[in-house]
Image (cartoon, rainbow, N blue to C red):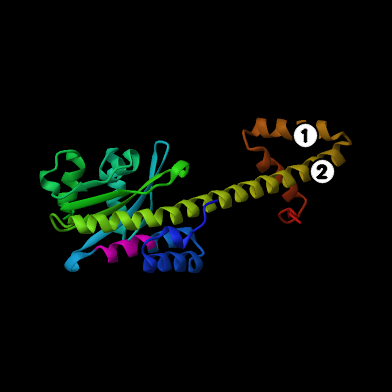
Amino acid sequence: MDTLDAANYPDPALWDHIHSLVLEESDLADFLDELARHAVASFRPDGTDILGGITLLRGRKAATIASSSEQARRLDEIQYGFGDGPCLTAGREHELVFVPDVASDGRWPGFTDVLEREGIHSILAVPFELGSDGEAALNLYSTTTNCFDPATIAQVQSHVAQWSKALRMGLRFAHYVEGAADLRAALESRTTIDIAVGVIMAENRCGQQEAFEVLRAASSGRNSKLRDVASEIVTALGQSKPVTHFD
């Protein structure tokens, strides 16, 4: 797994902020939302209103995994509905996308029409570098035309480059946690099925394989999942939910 190495980051203050987030935020979603809020706060010139979001693409699916506000999340989701737009292009093509004036940009006519109605007049989308862990982009929506000058764009690119390793590590960690949760659920389901098979063996004085076939036939006849039928048998005994021991 990648590690966060301060030597790889040219901005010590930003490194300290990322390091603090990693240590203080126990939830990945909270960590990413804080990154989005930090981006908005860092790149707001002259008090201009800016909305921020982080889009993650895996396969054909796109999702907003962090946002500075509900409006930012809603704008991202509207873009997904059109199937294309600045942040999707940035993530898929691994290139910076800058829309200085939404009204005069003709690349995504349906989406930009919505943006104008929402009061958004310029957009900056910068891709993260996640390697094989997926594709992602930071999306910044501004209520001002030509909001992002070359210096600000360069600053955003630098920050995103530094955030990429933290985001990549977070996504990998979430994947491992989800995998462990799936395994635990499978083992707990297996425990319930094994107990139900034991009950059928005792009641019918049959072997394990025969008892399992009886359970499977009941599942098929009721058009129910095997674990649900097994749970009904265990519950009928007046027992509480079976406990799976992982020691």
Q: Position of residue 50 (x, y in %)?
A: 23, 61
Q: Label 2, on which residue? A: 199
Q: Residue at x 67, y 42 (%)?
A: 227
Residue 62 position by quadrant: top left
Q: Label 1, on which residue? A: 212
Q: Which residue is drawn at 44% across and 62% down?
A: 31
Q: Does 177 appear above or below 135?
A: below
Residue at the far right: name it: 205
Q: How far apart are marks 1 and 2 (CA)?
A: 10 Å
Q: Where is residue 157 in the image (x, y as percent from the top left)?
A: 30, 53
Q: Which of 27 and 19 is in front in this view?
A: 19
Residue type beneath disc 2: Val
Q: Where is residue 27 in the image (x, y as percent from the top left)?
A: 49, 61
Most common SS among magenta residues: helix
Say which element carries label 1: helix
Q: Position of residue 21 (x, y in %)?
A: 45, 66
Residue type beneath disc 1: Phe
Q: Nearer the viewer, residue 143 or 10?
A: 10
Q: What crowding class fits label 2: few (fewer than 14 Cα within 10 Å), some (14-19), or many (20 or more)?
A: some
